[in-house]
């Protein structure tokens, strides 16, 4: 399974859907891999004369999967239930989706984005999700609803996922609504708006990874939030899933400690729900999509009295620059 950048996490673990390094969880993936290697090139759907599951419910809303009588197919089955007209998901894109997953034999729903409070995002086509997702979603369009029937080799393999009742012999059924596609070099798209205050970090406003210049002197002891690019999209609301690029720097040393840009991989996180550090939750709600936002975070708004050793000490003030690429309600 794929681990989320630890330096963004709040103290509580996120669902396993998003992270794998937190021990026990009540959720499963698609984040993960079956036993053995996973190809990331699209594989054709094998012909099958049997009946496929049906999916009911509106696009972007909780769906119901009905499993037909009889045994499952032995090969991956992919069916477009609703054809979208948006961007085409390419290998390496961050796919933002709503989904429901069920076990063929029992019809039991074992996971759903709706139970996590909103859409989720993850890189597609590069082996960071179970094989059937990589094989089924690359090449699909935003706005589509996709039905996927995954035999064990396309899901969790011979080991299954015992924490949610998936055996190594189980065939899985997913209904997936593709809400968005985001590329690894995507940047804020708004208008440059230089800060009015002196003594705050300077940040470049050209497309691509920003450069942060820390001013001389001691850091502030309060949360400071300001855009250097202001987008014209909707405002981020509490509970939204945002897609973002970011750079994190330590004020005292001026040293970068993390950057999504360096991984060529935007992230998706839920804002205002305690899934990220306090300064992100408080600083990004109310900002507009398309903005590049500077967050200056004293320890209590970042990693608290424990810090995040060995990189971040308990007394460190952190500067994040966040490009808000999208917000999904």
Image (cartoon, rainbow, N blue to C red):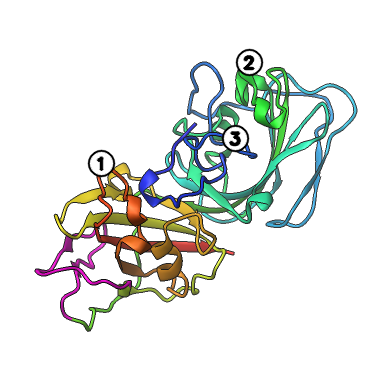
- Which of pointers 2 and 3 indicates the residue nearer the eye? 2
- Report which residue position mark 1 lands on: 310
Q: Earlier in the sequence, mark 2 or mark 3?
A: 3
Residue 101: image x %, image y %?
70, 39
Which picture quadrant has residue 287? bottom left
Q: Are marks 2 and 1 in contact (CB under 8 Å)?
A: no
For the residue labelled by badge 2, is the local secondary structure a helix, a strand or a loop?
A: helix
The stretch of residues the image draws in magenta is: 198-223
In the shown orientation, is residue 105 left or right of residue 41?
right
Residue 258: image x %, image y %?
28, 48
Q: Where the C terminus falls, by quadrant?
A: bottom right
Residue occupying the far right of the picture: 69
- Report which residue position mark 2 lands on: 158
Q: Earlier in the sequence, mark 1 or mark 3?
A: 3
Mark pair 2, 1: CA separation: 38 Å
- Report which residue position mark 3 lands on: 136
For the residue labelled by badge 3, is the local secondary structure a helix, a strand or a loop?
A: helix
Q: Is 125 within the magenta?
A: no
Q: What residue do we see at 84% from left, 30% from top?
A: 51
- Would you place residue 176 above or below residue 284 in this image? above
């Amino acid at each position: 399974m794929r681990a989320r950048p630890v330096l963004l996490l709040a103290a509580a673990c996120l669902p396993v859907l998003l992270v794998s390094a937190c021990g026990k969880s009540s959720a499963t993936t698609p984040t993960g891999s079956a036993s053995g290697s996973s190809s990331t090139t699209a594989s054709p759907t094998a012909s099958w004369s049997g009946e496929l599951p049906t999916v009911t419910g509106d696009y972007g809303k909780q769906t119901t999967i009905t499993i037909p009588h009889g045994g499952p197919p032995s090969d991956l089955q992919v069916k477009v239930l609703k054809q979208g007209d948006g961007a085409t998901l390419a290998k390496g894109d961050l796919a933002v989706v709503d989904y429901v997953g069920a076990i063929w034999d029992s019809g039991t729903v074992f996971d759903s984005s709706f139970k996590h409070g909103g859409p989720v995002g993850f890189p597609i086509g590069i082996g960071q999700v179970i094989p059937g997702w990589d094989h089924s979603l690359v090449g699909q369009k935003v706005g589509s609803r996709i039905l996927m029937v995954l035999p064990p080799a396309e899901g969790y393999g011979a080991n299954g996922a015992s924490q949610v009742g998936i055996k190594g012999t189980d065939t899985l059924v997913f209904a997936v609504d593709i809400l968005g596609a985001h590329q690894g070099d995507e940047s804020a798209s708004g208008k440059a708006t230089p800060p009015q205050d002196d003594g705050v970090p300077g940040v470049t406003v050209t497309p691509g990874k920003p450069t942060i210049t820390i001013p001389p002197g001691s850091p502030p002891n309060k949360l400071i939030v300001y855009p250097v690019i202001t987008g014209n999209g909707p405002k981020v609301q509490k509970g939204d899933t945002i897609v973002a690029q970011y750079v994190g720097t330590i004020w005292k040393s001026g040293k970068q400690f993390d950057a999504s840009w360096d991984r060529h991989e935007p992230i998706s996180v839920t804002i205002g729900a305690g899934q990220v550090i306090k300064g992100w939750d408080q600083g990004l709600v109310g900002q507009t999509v398309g903005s590049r936002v500077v967050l200056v975070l004293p320890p209590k708004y970042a990693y608290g009295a424990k810090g995040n050793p060995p990189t971040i000490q308990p007394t460190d003030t952190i500067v994040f620059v966040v490009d808000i690429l999208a917000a999904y309600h």
